[in-house]
């Protein structure tokens, strides 16, 4: 089992749609969680951190469920500019520190 | 922009050669992490440096090594290059405290091609 697994993509949605991404992680000692966005041939950029209480930033909502070891990202009212790869990221201590990225889920938003 | 810079932008090497990639961290950050991203995959954690010492390592062989300098900039060295080492190498800086490690901010990456 991979340490971090994401929904396989791609997701093809029309503008205005709501889309949800899920990500599961295997290490229960994981400490911090993030969603990053990566455009083609560019570096990953932080979208948002993920907290147990859930957090929202405009059209984006992230949730963490520690008991079930998964995190989610909801995008409402999709825009063409949301087309990108969304990466789930988990940090956990392991004789130091380790960051694991999911393989990413590609989103295409079409007019 | 994140303020994290990497050099060079692109690099072409041949099998068996050695390469050094460089990263300057964002002002105020004390930690640098290095990642390898092959085409179509997520970034793979190579290692992290904190206060000039390796603070965690992924599943990469010893021919991948690094350094962090007193100004928190960092180098990634790869010896005996193999064709599979062709990838985008990303550096990320962050601020580590005694409690946790803050968000990582990425540089633009170095694209390495091994022929």
Image (cartoon, rainbow, N blue to C red):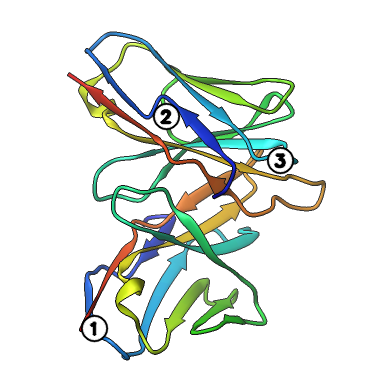
Marks 2 and 3, Cα distance to the nearest angstrom?
A: 25 Å
Is there CB contact under 8 Å for labels 2 and 3? no
Horizontal arrangement in the rendering, residue B5 relative to residue B90 (left or right):
right
Please rate how many residues cluster around mark 2, counting C-alpha atoms within 10 Å: few if below 14, some from 14 to 19, many from 20.
Answer: few
Q: What percent of the width, then of the height, locates residue B90?
A: 44, 38
Q: What percent of the width, then of the height, locates residue A81?
A: 34, 72
> In the rendered image of this protein, does residue B98 appear above or below residue A79?
above
Question: Tag 1, which secondary structure?
Answer: strand
Marks 2 and 1, Cα distance to the nearest angstrom?
A: 37 Å
Marks 3 and 1, Cα distance to the nearest angstrom?
A: 38 Å
Quadrant in the picture for the N terminus of chain A: bottom left
Q: Which residue is mark 3?
A: B29
Farthest-out residue, right: B98
Q: Quadrant of residue B79?
A: top left
Callout 2: chain: B
Q: Which residue is mark 2?
A: B60
Along the line of sight, which residue is nearer the eye, A46 or A103? A46
């Amino acid at each position: 089992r991979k340490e971090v697994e994401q929904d396989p993509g791609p997701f093809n949605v029309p503008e205005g749609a709501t889309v949800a991404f899920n990500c599961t992680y295997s290490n229960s000692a994981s400490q911090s969680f993030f969603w990053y966005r990566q455009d083609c041939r560019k570096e990953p950029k932080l979208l948002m951190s993920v907290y147990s209480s859930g957090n929202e930033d405009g059209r984006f909502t992230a949730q963490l469920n520690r008991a079930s070891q998964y995190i989610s990202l909801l995008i409402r009212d999709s825009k063409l500019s949301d087309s990108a790869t969304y990466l789930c990221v988990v940090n956990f201590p392991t004789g130091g520190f380790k960051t694991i990225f999911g393989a990413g889920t590609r989103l295409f938003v079409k007019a | 922009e994140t303020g994290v810079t990497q050099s060079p932008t692109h690099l072409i090497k041949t099998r068996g050669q050695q390469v050094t990639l460089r990263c300057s961290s964002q002002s105020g950050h004390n930690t640098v992490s290095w990642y390898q991203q092959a085409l179509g995959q997520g970034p793979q954690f190579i290692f992290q440096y904190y206060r000039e010492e390796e603070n965690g390592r992924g599943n990469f062989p010893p021919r991948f090594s690094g350094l962090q300098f007193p100004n928190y900039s960092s180098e990634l060295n790869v010896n005996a290059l193999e064709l599979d080492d062709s990838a985008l190498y990303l550096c990320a800086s962050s601020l580590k405290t005694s409690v946790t490690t803050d968000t990582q901010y990425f540089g633009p990456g170095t694209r390495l091609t091994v022929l």
